[in-house]
Image (cartoon, grey):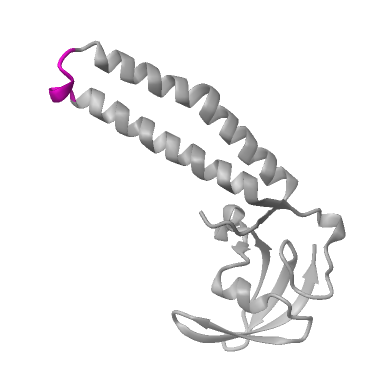
Amino acid sequence: MSDTNMYVTMETFEKMREELQKMKSIDRPAASRAIGEAREKGDLKENAEYDAAKEAQGMLEAKIKQLEGVIANAKIVDTKTIDTSKVTILTKVTITNMATKKTVTYQLVGEKEADLKAQKISGTSPIGKGLMGKVVGEVAEIQTPAGVLKFRVDNITV
């Protein structure tokens, strides 16, 4: 995890803190119990259950460390203070694909919140980066794996 800020809403920040607390207070003791139970079953050199429990514990510890890093670098953004004169993180932007004339609305969010099905895209994605700072009426030319796409910014809200 890099040391860059991750922009999140207070709601997402609280969910991350709850997830971290669960991992530390419930999942970590459960992993320790699983290792203890597997250790009681005999020779550790040939105990696949013990190896699996140790591996699961290692993965859990890595997840905890990663989430602690995300929380430490989280920057909570208050939706009431967002400037809607241009596209920024947490704004909802309605765009029209200039080639297909298809219109869609996305909310630009931090990487942790991105969910295309919920029409939330990361501000660090190619489209998110290309839209940042644009104003209503401006056309963004965005380099994507499929080539250059042109999107007109139709509306910006919170």
Residue closest to the far top: 40
- Residue, x 56% and y 28% (percent of image)? 22
- Looking at the rendering, the stretch of residues picked out in magenta corresponds to 42-47
Instruction: Please state the total of marks drawn on the protein image.
Output: 0
Q: Is residue 146 left or right of residue 72?
A: left
Quarter occupied by residue 94: bottom right
**Residue at image point 63% right, 33% down:** 18
Does the magenta run of residues contain 53?
Answer: no
Position of residue 100 relative to residue 93, above or below, is below
Q: In which quarter of the image is residue 4?
A: bottom right
Q: Where is residue 113 in the image (x, y as percent from the top left)?
A: 61, 53
| Above/below status of 50 relative to 128 | above
The C terminus, quarter of image: bottom right
Q: Is residue 38 left or right of residue 95?
A: left
Q: Position of residue 42 (x, y in %)?
A: 17, 13
Q: Give the quarter of the image for residue 121.
A: bottom right
In the displayed structure, would residue 73 be above or below residue 127? Answer: above
- Foreground of the two, 6 or 105: 6
Q: What percent of the width, then of the height, locates residue 13? A: 68, 44
Residue found at the far front of this picture: 3
Whether 105 is drawn above or below 110: the answer is: below
Query: Which residue does the image show at 55% across and 74% down from the upper left?
Result: 126
**Horizontally, is 118 left or right of 1 in the view?**
right
Q: Residue 54, position in %: x, y?
A: 31, 29
As for residue 43 lying within the magenta part, the answer is: yes
Residue at 63%, 66% in the rendered image: 123
